[in-house]
């Protein structure tokens, strides 16, 4: 049996503090642009089936119980107690929490107390820049305050994360933009935006990435499937090859988040560049009962010291549970089969499992 007693969720979000109706709950199971097919719900997905497999027993119900019964039990317990039971039942011992999404979401402190775990903050670069822009009157003050804010955030955050791929695409010029180019882009963006306006200018996105690289903190880059309406061909992690080459040797690790359905590309980059790591989160959560097959594809290419577990969960504590349970099940199935075949020793399988579950994340992010 492959054991992973310590589990570091190296990328997730907080959970909603409010009670959820059926429609709101379902919307977090599949990020589509419209309603489900007639006569079905978003529970009719691999993620939805995984929720029904793993979460009901934590709330005192049988596995695979009907969604209506599960949600009734959730309401009966209340959002706080249900969240406590689910997070503590996930087996996750450390959460690294991206605090850059809107909504009434718990922060790292609440995640730690609710889940009886440790928690640390990941700072989202684009949100930080937007907040700085809201309080900066001139281009010069914006750029100065931005550099100072990133430097200040690096003192407490365990990592930075960027959604440049979501906002613009990952085919950005790999080199840092020049000072004049940055000032011009900042001037145009500030002149045309309203308070709270989103940052999507490619020059400023590159500028942000390079400020983060200079901080020395790990930099997480979103790739693969993401928000509804996203052109995923623009988020293939292979588009980051030149940026990875340009940042090699500078002392900052790059973590390719999500990756799926380009998980093999992410695994390949992790094998080529010493400072590049690949995340397992979305690839396993989205594929559910097929998670073991997808994990085995990632393990074909990536060195075992370059893979990181995450749930990628947002909003629902159920997604933290599903992320953790699918990962453990898939890892045990894949590595256990290789041990049974004689391809691996049990000692090696257990050591690799510990690396992917927690050891690699502890090393990259400096958390214990």
Image (cartoon, grey):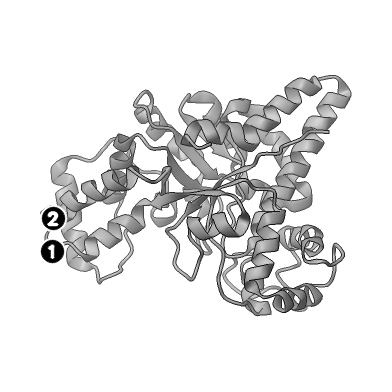
Image height of 78 relative to 116, above or below: below
Report, in whole angstroms, how far the alpha carbon at label 2 lies from the one at label 1. 7 Å
Image height of 114 relative to 242, above or below: below
Q: Position of residue 52 (x, y in %)?
A: 79, 63
Q: Secondary structure at mark 2?
A: helix
Residue drawn at x 81%, y 20% as measured from the top left: 343
Give the number of the disc on residue 75. none
Q: Is 352 situated left or right of 121 in this image?
A: right
Q: Secondary structure at mark 1?
A: loop
Q: Is 10 situated left or right of 178 in this image?
A: right
Q: Is 47 situated left or right of 215 in this image?
A: right
State if disc 1 and disc 2 touch (CB < 8 Å): yes
Q: Position of residue 347 (x, y in %)?
A: 77, 21
Image height of 45 relative to 223, above or below: below
Q: Is 354 situated left or right of 269 in this image?
A: right
Q: Which residue is mark 2?
A: 141
Residue drawn at x 77%, y 61% as measured from the top left: 58
Residue drawn at x 78%, y 57% as measured from the top left: 54
Q: Is residue 336 visible?
A: yes
Foreground: 277 or 290? 277
Q: How many neighbours does mark 1 have within 10 angstroms: few (below 14), some (14-19), or many (20 or more)?
A: few
Foreground: 171 or 145? 145
Give the number of the disc on residue 137. 1
Q: Position of residue 102 (x, y in %)?
A: 44, 67
Where's the N terminus, which quadrant?
top right
Residue drawn at x 35%, y 58% as measured from the top left: 127
């Amino acid at each position: 049996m492959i054991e992973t007693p310590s589990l570091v969720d190296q990328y997730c979000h907080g959970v909603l503090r409010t009670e959820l109706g059926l429609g709101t709950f379902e919307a977090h199971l599949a990020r589509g642009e419209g309603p489900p097919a007639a006569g079905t719900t978003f529970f009719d997905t691999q993620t939805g089936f995984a929720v029904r497999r793993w979460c009901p027993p934590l709330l005192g119900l049988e596995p695979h119980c009907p969604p209506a019964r599960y949600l009734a039990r959730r309401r009966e317990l209340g959002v706080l107690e249900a969240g406590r039971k689910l997070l503590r039942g996930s087996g996750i011992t450390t959460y690294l929490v991206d605090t850059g999404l809107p909504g009434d979401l718990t922060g790292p402190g609440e995640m730690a107390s609710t889940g009886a775990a440790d928690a640390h903050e990941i700072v989202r670069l684009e949100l930080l820049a937007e907040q700085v822009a809201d309080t900066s009157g001139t281009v010069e003050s914006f750029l100065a305050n931005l550099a100072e804010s990133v430097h200040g955030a690096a003192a407490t955050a365990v990592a930075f994360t960027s959604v440049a791929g979501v906002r613009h695409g990952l085919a950005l010029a790999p080199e840092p933009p020049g000072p004049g180019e940055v000032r011009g882009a900042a001037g145009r963006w500030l002149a045309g935006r309203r308070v709270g306006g989103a940052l999507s200018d490619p020059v400023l996105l590159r500028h942000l990435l390079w400020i983060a690289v200079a901080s020395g903190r790990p930099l997480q880059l979103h790739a693969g499937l993401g928000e509804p309406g996203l052109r995923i061909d623009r988020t293939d992690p292979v588009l980051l090859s030149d940026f990875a080459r340009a940042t090699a040797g500078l002392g900052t690790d790059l973590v390719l988040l999500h990756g799926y359905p380009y998980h093999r590309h992410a695994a390949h980059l992790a094998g080529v560049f010493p400072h590049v790591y690949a995340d397992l989160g979305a690839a396993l959560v989205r594929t559910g009962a097929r998670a073991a097959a997808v994990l085995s594809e990632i393990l074909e290419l990536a060195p075992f010291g370059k893979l990181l577990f995450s749930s990628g969960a947002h909003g629902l504590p159920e997604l933290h549970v599903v992320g953790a349970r699918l990962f453990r099940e898939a890892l045990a199935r894949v590595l256990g089969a290789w041990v049974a075949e004689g391809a691996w020793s049990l000692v090696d399988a257990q050591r690799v499992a510990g690396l992917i579950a927690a050891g690699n994340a502890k090393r990259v992010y400096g958390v214990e």
